[in-house]
Image: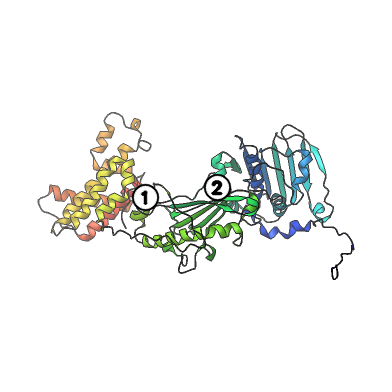
Amino acid sequence: MAGASRKEFFERIDGTPQKRMFLSIMADYDLPTAICELVDNAIDHWIATGKPAGTAIRLFLDAQRQLITVRDNAGGVPVDQMRLLIAPGATRPFDTGNLIGNFGVGGKRASVALGEQVTITSRYKKQDSYQLEITKDWLADEDWRIDVSRVPNIEPNTTNVSISEVRQGFSQRDLDELYRHLEATYAYFIKEGCEIFLNGSLVGATTFDTWAFPPGHAPKQMSFDIGLTDGETLRAKVSGGLIRDRVPEADNYGVYFYCNGRLILKELKTRDVGYFITAEAGVPHPDGSLCRVIVELFGPAELMPWNSSKNGISFSHAAFTHVRPSIIELVTYFSKLSRRFKNDREAGVYQYDSGAVEPITPATSTSKKRLILPPLKRQPKLSYSQKLLQLNQGTMARKPWTLGLVEAMGMIDVALDQEFETKNRTALILLDSNVEIGMKEYIVNNTALFPPHKYKGNALSDILTNRTKVLNEVKNQLKIDANTEAKLKYFYGLRNKLIHERASVQILDRDINEYREIVEKLLRKMFGVRFPQ
C-alpha cells in the first residue's frame, strides 16, 4: 500500500537487567520495611500450604555484632527452584491468590538492601539442604549465574537467610520499634496461628478496631466488590468510628490500610482521604482525633494499590479511586462527631466499649448524598457525685467493696455544697472515716500483699481495731511518705477532738481541701478509683 512504512531489521539487543538494579532501590528500605519483605515471603509459603499449625518465623537481630537472621519452617525451597531466590520477577507458582509477598523481587532486593553478604540455606521437606551466597563480588559481576552448594542438613521445611556486613546499623531502640511494627503489621496472621519471634520473644498482635459505641453513634461499615481488569475483583471493607485508644501525645487516628490482612499504612491524614479540605474532615486537629477509618482489601496481590515496598498506597491506583469516596464519607462524618464530643470524651465516648458495627451502603464518586450527623441529644449536666459513680462503674463491678468508698466521696461533695455553717465538720468526719475504711478493705481484700497465713490467731482483728496499726500495716505498700503520714495523724486527731471533746474545733476550708486530696490519692493507689477533673 502506498505510503506504508516498512520495518527493516537492524540488530537484536540484550534486555537482561543489570544487577545494579538491586543497589538502586536501597533507599526504598529501612529496617522494618526490609525485614517485613522477608517475613512476607515466609507467610505466603504458610498460606499456600494451608496454614499448618506449628509454623514459626524466627528473627534474630544482634545489635552488638550487627548480624541478621530470618528463619522459617514454612516449607523450604526445592533445589530446582533455588534460582527463584535471586531471579528478579521470578516467584513460586502458588495456587492461592490472596498473598502478600508475591512480587518476585521484594525478598531479593530486601536482603541485598540489608547487608553486603547474604547466605540463603533451604531444605525442602526431608530432601538435602542447599545454599547460595549473594556477595559483593557477585553483585559486581553482570553474570547472573550463581553457585548452589549442598550443605549439612538443617531442619526439614526450613529456610534460613543470614545477613552480615549490614548497610544500615541498628540499635536496641530500633529493635524495640521493629517489635511494635511486627505486632501491628502481622496481627491478622498471628491470630490465625502463624507465630513470629524476635530474638526469642513471641510477637503479640496489635489491632486498631478499638471502637467506641456511644448511643446513636455506632461505628459504621461498608462492604463491596471492586471490579478491575479481566473480570478480576477485590473485596473491600471500609469501617469507621470513634475510638477508645486515643493517645494524646501520639497521632494514632486517621486512616489505616490493610491488604490481604497485612497492615500497609496507618495514621494517614492527607487530602487523599479527606483531610485539609474544609467541606470534609478539615485540618487534622486534636478535637477530631477520635476518628479512625480502617480499609481492608482482599484479592489478587497484583491488583492491590500498595507500592512495591508495601509501606505505602498509590493514590492513583484504580482500586484506591474506587474506595476513596467511602473513606472520605466516614472520615468526614466521624471527624465532625469527634469534635462534638471534645469536652465529654470520658462520659460520652470512652465508657461505651461494646456494641454492634452498623452496616451501611457504600459511597460512590457520583453520589451527592452524605452521611448526616443526627442531632446530638443534650445531656443533662451531671453532678460531681454522678460523674464519680459513672467513672467508677467498672471498678465497682470488679471490686464491690469500693462501692461504699466511692459513694462516700460523693456524699462529701454533697455536704460541702450545702449552706450549713458546720459542713466542714461533716466533711472531715466522712473523709477520715472513709480513708480508715479504705485501708482496712485494702488489707482484707489484697491477699497477695497481706496473706492470711501471716496473721495468726487474732492478729488481724487486733490490727483492724487500731487505727495506728492499720496505717503502719499499709504505709510501706502504698509508699506513704513521712509528710503524708503526719497529716493523716493530724486530721485523725481533729476528728477525735470533734467526737470526744466538749469544745468543737474550727475546721477550715483549706483543711478539707488538703485532706480531700490526700484521701483521693490513697483511694487511687489502693483501688484505682477515678475522680472527675
State whether residue 440 appears in this view: yes
Q: Amino acid at mark 1?
A: Tyr
Q: Position of residue 486 (x, y in %)?
A: 28, 51
Closest to the observer: 459 or 308?
A: 308
Tell me the quarter of the image containing the C terminus: bottom left
305 or 44, nearer to the observer: 305
Residue 117 place in picture, x, y as percent: 75, 50
For residue 183, which numbered disc appears in the image? 2
Q: Which residue is mark 1?
A: 352
Q: Amino acid at mark 2?
A: Glu
Secondary structure of the residue carrying tag 2 is helix
Look at the image and tell me whether residue 515 can be seen: no
Determine the image quadrant of residue 272. bottom right
| Residue 500 relative to residue 22: left or right | left
- In the rendering, at what x and y percent does residue 196 appear? 59, 42
* Mark 1 neighbour density, 10 Å: few (under 14) some (14–19) many (20 or more): some
The residue shown at (68%, 42%) is 94
Up/down of 439 relative to 245, above or below: above
